[in-house]
Amino acid sequence: MENSADKLIIEAPHLLSPPQRFLSWFLTTLGWLVWCYLWLPAWQWCWNVLQTGELSDTASRTSGLTTLGVYTLIGITLGTALVVWAMSSYYKYKGVDRRKPRGNARPQDVARQLGIPLEVLLAGKDKQVMVVHHLTDGGIARVEALG
């Protein structure tokens, strides 16, 4: 029987090949390093406040305003791009419902997918509380239908 955790690659690193596992580790590490690098100005500011006791430096105020203006311009440009994209999608699909119904799931299919007996699934339909016990790999060990 196939474990439910084996279907989700993110929950099953043992299914990754060694190069994929290394790439995943490398990209995660790189992401954390970039995240820490982006916090360096805040850490530097905190360090300067602790060393000097002053919250702001009047000499760097002009360059700060220039940087703020550049960031504001970038934010306005990105916001405008998102609004233009949303409006083009709205006019492109105006009045057209692209969503399709998924169809009804039969109880037999649901029980087979969850790996539980059909009787347990049907018994649980009328109950208010269901307790699901999981295996260590994420699969379902058993299901109890309570009150």
Image: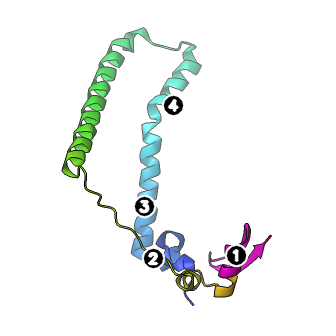
Q: Which residue is mark 2?
A: 16
State which tag comes first along the sequence, 2 or 1.
Answer: 2
Looking at the picture, how far across and down is residue 63, in whole percent?
A: 32, 17
Q: Are marks 2 and 1 in contact (CB under 8 Å)?
A: no
Identify the magenta region: 121-146
Q: Look at label 4 and name its amino acid.
A: Trp
State which tag comes first along the sequence, 3 or 2.
Answer: 2
Nearer to me, 35 or 52: 35
Q: Quote the CA–CA distance across marks 1 and 3.
A: 45 Å
Nearer to me, 15 or 52: 15
Q: Which residue is mark 1?
A: 124
The crowd level at tag 4 (other Cα within 10 Å; few <14, some 14-19, many 20+) is few
Question: SS for tag 4?
Answer: helix
Q: Are marks 4 and 2 in contact (CB under 8 Å)?
A: no
In the depicted structure, whether residue 14 falls above or below residue 67 = below
Q: Which residue is mark 4?
A: 43
State which tag comes first along the sequence, 1 or 4.
Answer: 4
Q: Are marks 1 and 3 in contact (CB under 8 Å)?
A: no
